[in-house]
Image: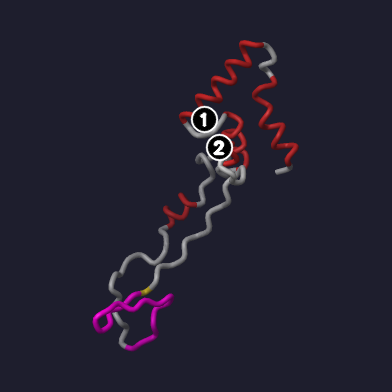
Amino acid sequence: MRPSTLLSLLLLPILGGCDGPALVATAGVNVASLTLVGRSVPDILVSGVTGRDCSIVRLDRGMSYCAARVPAPSPPPYCTRSRGSVDCWVTRPGTIPMVQGVVDGPASLTPAQEADRTARWPGF
């Protein structure tokens, strides 16, 4: 998204509030939104359009305005028992017979977990 487009989206909510009471009400809504949700009203609009987590609070913390997309988690290591310890590998060792792992848990995300991980913010 170009910076000029982003700036116009951020300034859009205050355009209607050129008089004093409307400007105070807009500021009050933004302060309440920042307190309750952690995002101002323009941040919520930009987050909905881009599908990423965008917030002016991130800028205040010295981070980028929008959070980067989270990469898929790497598969867990494969660990087996050894004499007096546990050995772990990135991939399953090719031994015959197969050595049973210390913990046989899921090696990847379920389809529902992957859909939740890649969902747009706030669920659009």
Residue 49 x, y percent position in the rendering:
62, 39
Viewer-side residue, 37 vs 49: 37
**Residue 102's spot in the image, x, y percent?**
28, 73
Residue occupied by mark 2: 57
Quadrant (top left/top right/bottom left/bottom right) for the N terminus: top right
Q: Residue at x 43, y 75 (%)?
A: 90
Magenta-highlighted residues: 79-96
Rounded to the nearest angstrom, the CA distance separating label 2 from label 1 is 8 Å
Query: Residue at 51% of width from left, 39% of height from top?
Result: 122
- The single residue placed furthest to the bottom in the displayed view is 96
Q: Is residue 71 magenta?
A: no
* Residue matched to label 1: 34
Q: Earlier in the sequence, mark 2 or mark 1?
A: 1
Is residue 4 positioned above or below 80 on the image?
above
Furthest toward the right, the residue is 4
Q: Vertical placement of 106 versus 43: above or below? A: below
* Dots 2, 1 in contact, CB < 8 A: yes
Q: Front-most of 98 and 55?
A: 55
- As displayed, is residue 87 above or below residue 58? below
Q: Residue furthest toward the left? A: 84
